[in-house]
Amino acid sequence: MGFQLGYTKYCCFICLWDSRAIALHYIKRDWSQRASFKSGEMNVEHPPLAEQQKIIIPPLHIKLGPVKNLVKAMDKNGSAFKYLHEKFPRLSVAKIKEGVSVGPQIKQLFRDPKFEKLLRSKEKQVWDAFYQVSTNFLGNDKAENYKDLVEDMLALFHDFGCSMSLKIHFLDSQLNFFPDNCGQVSDEHGERFHQDITNMGKRYQGNWSTTMLADYYWTLIRDTPHVHYKRKAK
């Protein structure tokens, strides 16, 4: 959408949500709508490449936000947090501490009874609420009471001390902007890029460089560009 990079004040493309007004987070929900995308104003750096109403919020991308802030708010000396190091040994200590994860790892935790048993009382309440939103709103099914589920999750996140992020803000203030069926919106390409670039980053020992990005581009070039591929129906 042409926004400035980094931790900016107005990072939402729908409204003028103030990411730095921490005292208002989880409390104020009605923010002024973003009327224009003029370069140099409200953290807009370049004109957007797509119209606002044509932007689709990917559900998996949204899931990563609550998980990240939930893990960051967990007791670092607790059994559940320590278990994450055991569960995902390939993730660095810094990434686990910051709650960095990918889609498959979230699914693994959802199916892991040991992780749930290690969660403390409040941690489990927050985790269960996030699970309900993930399966009954951000998944293939949309429950009739999805708004209540989101409300409950946000209230527990606030009480647990989870900081507000742009992804959580979308759930808090822009719930009507989500598609009717989030399961129809595919995150396949974004998730594939995330996993591929993670594997390639290991070759560069975690050091980001333009060379690594160039190597990734080479993997996208086909030897037979004239051949057309179709996705097989499952």
Image (tube, rainbow, N blue to C red):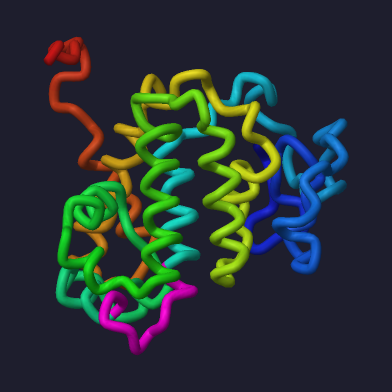
Q: How many marks?
A: 0
Task: Locate residue 192: give its quadrant.
Answer: top left
**Can the viewer see residue 102 in this picture?**
yes
Residue 38, image x, y percentages? 85, 37
Tell me what residue is drawn at x 50 percent, y 24 percent.
144
Question: In which quadrant will I find the N terminus?
Answer: top right
Quarter of the view holding residue 25: bottom right
Residue 205 in view here: no
- Which of the image's four quarters has the C terminus? top left
* Frontmost residue, 143 versus 214: 143
Where does the image place residue 143, in percent across and percent down from the top left?
44, 26
Q: Is residue 98 above or below residue 150?
A: below
Residue projecting furthest to the front? 121
Work out whether 35 lies above or below 119.
above
Q: Nearer the viewer, residue 77 or 52?
A: 77
Q: Tell me where residue 128 appears, x and y as whole percent.
A: 38, 54
Residue 131: x and y in percent read: 37, 48
Q: Nearer the viewer, residue 207 or 13?
A: 13
Instruction: State the residue at coordinates (84%, 48%).
Output: 42
Residue 2 located left or right of residue 89: right
* Of residues 79 and 201, the one drawn nearer to the viewer in this rendering: 79
Q: Is residue 33 left or right of residue 107?
A: right
Magenta extent: 71-81
User: Residue 78 colored magenta?
Assistant: yes
